[in-house]
Image: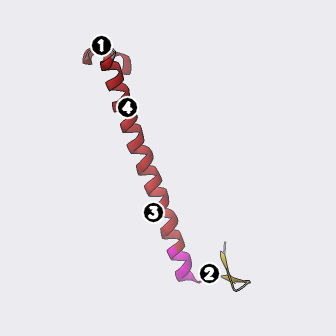
Amino acid sequence: MPRFKIVDGQTIQLSSEEEAVKDAEINSEEYLNLKNAEQNAINKKASGKQKLKDLGLDDDEIQALMGA
């Protein structure tokens, strides 16, 4: 499906090189979003474990609750 850009009020189809650049930008954005989501999940898990420790649970109890 061709993509277009607007230059000086005119709609112009992107060249194959421009399409390749656009695809790379989209893929790198998706990759960064995925990596950020993975890191957020890791951070939240660590934060949750620390909160349980702050409540007085030991590592064995936390492991039993989390199943890990």
For mark 2, what is the residue? 14
Distance between the Cα atoms at labels 4 and 3? 26 Å
What secondary structure characterizes most of the magenta part?
A: helix
For marks 1 and 2, the one nearer the N-term is 2
Distance between the Cα atoms at labels 2 and 4? 44 Å
- Is residue 15 left or right of 48 when viewed as pictured? right
Distance between the Cα atoms at labels 1 and 2? 60 Å
What secondary structure is marked by label 3?
helix
Distance between the Cα atoms at labels 2 and 3? 19 Å
Q: Residue type at mark 1?
A: Gly
Q: Residue type at mark 4?
A: Lys
Of all residues, the one furthest to the front in this rendering is 54
What secondary structure is marked by label 4?
helix
Q: On the image, which quarter does residue 13 sit in? A: bottom right
For mark 3, what is the residue? 28
Q: Residue type at mark 2?
A: Leu
Q: Position of residue 23 (x, y in %)?
A: 52, 69
Dot in front, 2 or 4:
4
For mark 1, what is the residue? 56
Q: Which corner quadrant holds the N terminus? A: bottom right
For mark 4, what is the residue? 45
Q: Position of residue 54 (x, y in %)?
A: 31, 19
What secondary structure is marked by label 2?
loop
For marks 4 and 3, the one nearer the N-term is 3
Dot in front, 3 or 1:
1
Q: Which corner quadrant holds the C terminus? A: top left
Q: Position of residue 46 (x, y in %)?
A: 33, 31
Give above or below for 57 relative to 51: above
How was this image coloured? secondary structure
The magenta-colored residue range is: 15-21
- Whether residue 4 appears in magenta in the rendering, the answer is no
